[in-house]
Image (tube, helix red, strand yellow):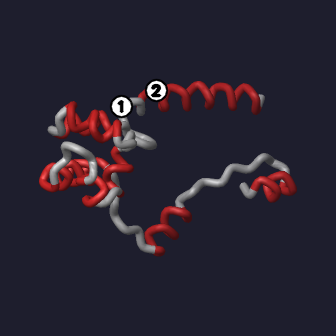
Amino acid sequence: MAAAEALTMGGETMESVDDMEGEDFGPQLVEGLEAQGISATDIKKLKDAGYHTIEAIAYSTKKKLTEIKGISEAKAIKIQDEAAKLVPMGFTTAAEHLKARQDIINLSTGCKDLDELLGG
């Protein structure tokens, strides 16, 4: 019966994952900056220079961006500002991190030794 419940739960989980497709998880492609007003030619220059994600641009230095041919200092600032709006770059305190860790749900396999082995 537990296997049937797991399949049912798995089906529901898949539906909820499908509902979340519009949300951004993981690295965001640099093409996403086009919606923020960055031109396609500037995006191509960034990709040619090896910047394929918005996170790479957000964490890059202004000096590195200005070394790209065709990217001026003003343009680099604008690109970094737009990238920073899309990437969470804030500082997390230890207390906030502890609170997030406390909210984690642990699942049990029903076997104490296996739970200990898996850390769950």
Q: Secondary structure under badge 2?
A: helix
In the picture of the structure, the residue carrying the numbered disc 2 is: 18
Residue in view at x 69 percent, y 30 percent: 5
Identify the residue position indicated by label 1 in the image. Answer: 22
Kindly identify the residue that appears in the image at 39 percent across and 42 percent down.
50
* Left or right relative to 22: residue 117: right
Between residues 80 and 13, which one lies in front from this camera angle?
Answer: 80
Q: Are marks 2 and 1 in contact (CB under 8 Å)?
A: no
Give me the residue at 34% from left, 37% from top. Answer: 47
x, y percent for residue 70: 19, 43
Whether residue 22 sits left or right of residue 104 in the image: it is left
> Relative to 5, is 81 above or below?
below
Does residue 113 sit above or below 45 in this rendering? below
Query: What type is the residue that disc 2 sits on?
Result: Asp
Q: Amino acid at mark 1?
A: Gly
Q: Determine the image quadrant of residue 4.
A: top right
Residue 74 horizontal/vertical position (percent): 12, 54
Residue 28 point in image, percent of width and height: 38, 40
